[in-house]
Image (tube, helix red, strand yellow):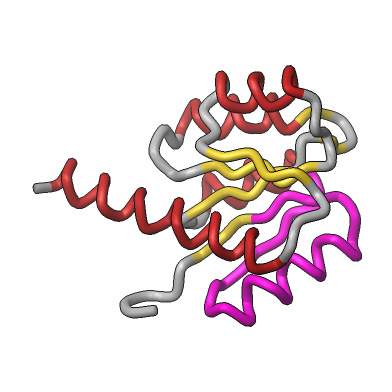
Amino acid sequence: MQGPTPRVLCTEDHSDTRDLIRFVLAAEGFEVTCAESPHHAIYLAQNQQFDLYLLDNWTPGTSGVELCEKLREFDPHTPILFFSSGAYEADKQRAFNCGAQEYLTKPADGDVLTSKVRGLIAKSKRSQAGREG
């Protein structure tokens, strides 16, 4: 990858899944910051710049959809990818309705996750260049 290292904020309450996501994405050149809770994710997103938010739909205290809505209140452009074991069509539709660009169901192959992350960031960069140009 060229340019600055793409930064991903991952919100995942299970430490083993967090570690796996961090390992898979870091091996492909992404800088991954993990938040254990939606509250921590909001704090990080408000204080740092990320190229993509990776959200689990099922987190203690609030849903991924609620987190997505809060992120969209102050960041309408950074792509959001749900990576969740919740595979119900209604869950997916709620995620898209609150501003997510993609919904990937766990478990998923690391190559699929990496490909989705890379594609969403690239699309966002092209869109951003169009807004600035």
* Residue 34, image quadrant: bottom right
The residue lying at 35 percent from left, 49 percent from top is 124
User: Which quadrant would the N terminus be assigned to in this image?
Assistant: bottom left
Q: How many marks?
A: 0
Position of residue 27 relative to residue 106, above or below, is below
Q: Position of residue 133 (x, y in %)?
A: 9, 48
Position of residue 91 relative to residue 57, above or below, is above
- Give left or right: position of 105 versus 32: right
The residue lying at 56 percent from left, 60 percent from top is 8
Q: Position of residue 28 (x, y in %)?
A: 57, 78
* Residue 4, image quadrant: bottom left
Identity of the residue furthest to the left in this view: 133
The residue lying at 26 percent from left, 52 percent from top is 126
- Give left or right: position of 56 versus 96: right
Q: Position of residue 24 (x, y in %)?
A: 70, 73
- State yes or no: residue 35 in magenta: yes
Q: Nearer the viewer, residue 131 or 105?
A: 105
Q: Which residues are magenta?
A: 10-37
The residue lying at 48 percent from left, 62 percent from top is 118
- Give left or right: position of 6 versus 71: left
Q: Position of residue 78 (x, y in %)?
A: 44, 44
- State yes or no: residue 26 in magenta: yes
Q: Nearer the viewer, residue 32 or 115?
A: 115
- Give left or right: position of 10 versus 84: left
Q: Nearer the viewer, residue 38 or 12?
A: 12
